[in-house]
Image (cartoon, helix red, strand yellow):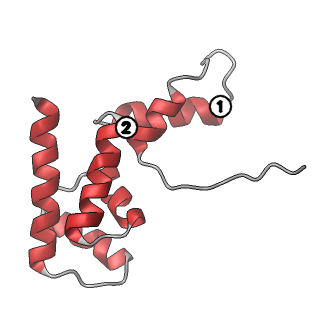
Amino acid sequence: MVNEISRKPITLHEAKEMLTGIDVETADQIQKRALDYVSKFAKFPGAEARSLVEKLVKEAGLTEYQAIEVVNVMPKTREELRTFTVGWRQLAPTETLDKILQILATAKVEAKA
């Protein structure tokens, strides 16, 4: 019987939770570098990040992949956010960008509380 590997996009925050369970002494170089990276850049617990992704999909109309990209970087301005929309090859209306930024700002405030 062949085991199938499934692929699912995850946030840096979820990756951090997965990688913190590894034994650093026995980890290979790639695992160590990945753990170092996510430790520096992941700011939320994985469940909160996933909830934020779902909120962006539902309320801002992003795809899961787009929402994960945004959550991983947490842009603060329209200009930073437009950088993503260029990569997605779509022009997002200013109202949509503002909605995304509002959702991200709310998440940052809630994370600090």
Please say if 104 is above or below 18. Answer: below
Instruction: Tell me if 58 is positioned left or right of 76 in this view.
Output: right
Name the residue located 45 percent from the left edge and 31 percent from the top edge: 17
The numbered disc on residue 46 is 2
Name the residue located 37 percent from the left edge and 69 percent from the top edge: 63
Q: Which one is nearer the viewer's eye here, 63 or 1? A: 1
How many numbered circles are shown?
2
Q: Which one is nearer the viewer's eye here, 11 or 58? A: 58
User: Is disc 2 placed on a helix, strand or loop?
Assistant: helix
Instruction: Tell me if 91 is positioned left or right of 108 in this view.
Output: right
Name the residue located 34 percent from the left edge and 38 percent from the top edge: 47
Residue position for label 1: 29
Please say if 73 is above or below 81. Answer: above
Q: How far across and how far down the image is residue 99, in percent? A: 12, 66
User: Is disc 1 placed on a helix, strand or loop?
Assistant: helix
Q: How far across and how far down the image is residue 38, in percent? A: 43, 36
